[in-house]
Image (tube, helix red, strand yellow):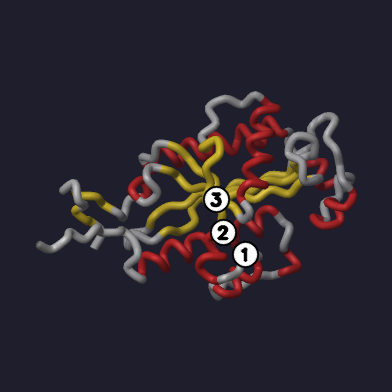
């Protein structure tokens, strides 16, 4: 049943995305960077996946955005971080396809704003694994480039590390995916696109599983006299 009458007697269709997260439009994001400091270290790769509801009211992945990014002028490049993400800034193919931070953030915001409008949502919210990290780099890049009309909530987010810790007792992405029976190839980890795809699957699984257990929508019970 998709339509529920709440305590205010208003009928709400929970098959619509705008009614699932209080008007927020969830966008799954992952970044690969040249360090841990979003103010000084380069943003090197960005991937995002928007979400939508299917006819049964289940959350599923929708559109995908992915780009390799040229480090901004003066960006710090931490060798230890580069070992972890495996990015070669001197790779000729990467140099050919990498875009500026301005183009990367502009393209992301345009896709998100279109999806947000189509879904009838009021604002977008970042979904990420250890979300504060990814959100920090996206917001810092937006500030550096001066891109206007940022669709994202400035500090709110959905952190799948916290959510999977609550649901599975696991906070590491690969272990949370394993608990959810989501295949995870460790060799592809630390690719922004691959990690975003797995994080999107994980978030959708948790939201949909809660729904299947009757945990959403929450219907307040009235006290009996």
Indicate the secondary structure of the residue bearing disc 2. Answer: helix
Of labels 1 and 3, earlier in sequence is: 3
Q: Nearer the viewer, residue 96 or 5?
A: 5
Q: Earlier in the sequence, mark 2 or mark 1?
A: 2
Q: Dot 3 corresponds to which residue?
A: 127
- The residue carrying pointer 2 sits among few (fewer than 14), some (14 to 19) or many (20 or more) residues within 10 Å by Cα, namely some
Residue 184 visible within the image: yes
Q: Is residue 23 above or below residue 28?
A: above
- Please give the residue where the numbered disc 1 appears in the rendered image: 171
- The image position of residue 196, as x and y in percent, is 61, 55
Vertical comparison of 149 with 81: above or below: above
Is residue 150 found left or right of 80 in the rendered image? left
Give the SS element for disc 3. strand
Q: Quadrant of residue 148?
A: top right
* Count of numbered circles on the image: 3
Q: Position of residue 192 (x, y in %)?
A: 69, 53
Depth check: 161 or 93 in front?
161
Residue drawn where x is 62% and y is 64% of the image: 171
Q: Please say whether residue 97 is visible from this viewpoint.
A: no
Q: Position of residue 121 (x, y in %)?
A: 39, 40
Q: Residue at x 61, y 56 (%)?
A: 129
Frontmost of labels 2 and 3 is 2
* Residue 144 appears left or right of 167: right
| Mark 1 surroundings: few (<14), some (14-19) or many (≥20) residues within 10 A | some
Q: Nearer the viewer, residue 208 or 61?
A: 208
Reading the image, the residue beneath label 2 is: 162
As drawn, 189 above or below 29: below
Q: Residue at position x 51%, y 37% from top?
A: 153
Which is in the foreground here, disc 1 or disc 3? Answer: 1
Instruction: Give the CA separation, mark 2 to mark 1.
Output: 7 Å
């Amino acid at each position: 049943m998709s339509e529920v009458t709440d305590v205010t007697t208003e009928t709400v269709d929970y098959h619509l995305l705008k009614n699932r997260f209080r008007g927020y439009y969830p966008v799954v994001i992952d970044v690969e960077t040249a360090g841990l400091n979003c103010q000084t270290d380069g943003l090197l790769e960005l991937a995002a996946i928007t979400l939508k509801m299917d006819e049964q009211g289940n959350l599923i992945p929708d559109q995908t955005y992915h780009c390799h990014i040229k480090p901004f002028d003066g960006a710090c490049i931490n060798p230890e971080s580069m070992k972890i993400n495996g990015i070669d800034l001197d790779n000729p193919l990467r140099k050919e396809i990498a875009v500026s931070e301005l183009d990367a953030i502009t393209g992301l915001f345009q896709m998100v704003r279109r999806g947000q409008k189509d879904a009838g949502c009021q604002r977008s919210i970042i979904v990420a694994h250890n979300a504060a990290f990814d959100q920090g780099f996206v917001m810092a890049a937006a500030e550096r480039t001066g891109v206007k009309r940022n669709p994202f909530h400035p500090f709110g987010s959905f952190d799948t590390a916290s959510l999977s810790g609550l649901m599975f007792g696991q906070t590491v992405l690969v272990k949370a995916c394993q608990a959810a029976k989501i295949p995870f190839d460790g060799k592809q980890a630390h690719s922004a696109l691959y990690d975003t795809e797995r994080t999107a699957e994980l978030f959708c699984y948790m939201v949909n599983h809660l729904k299947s257990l009757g945990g959403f929508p929450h219907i307040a019970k009235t006290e009996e006299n």
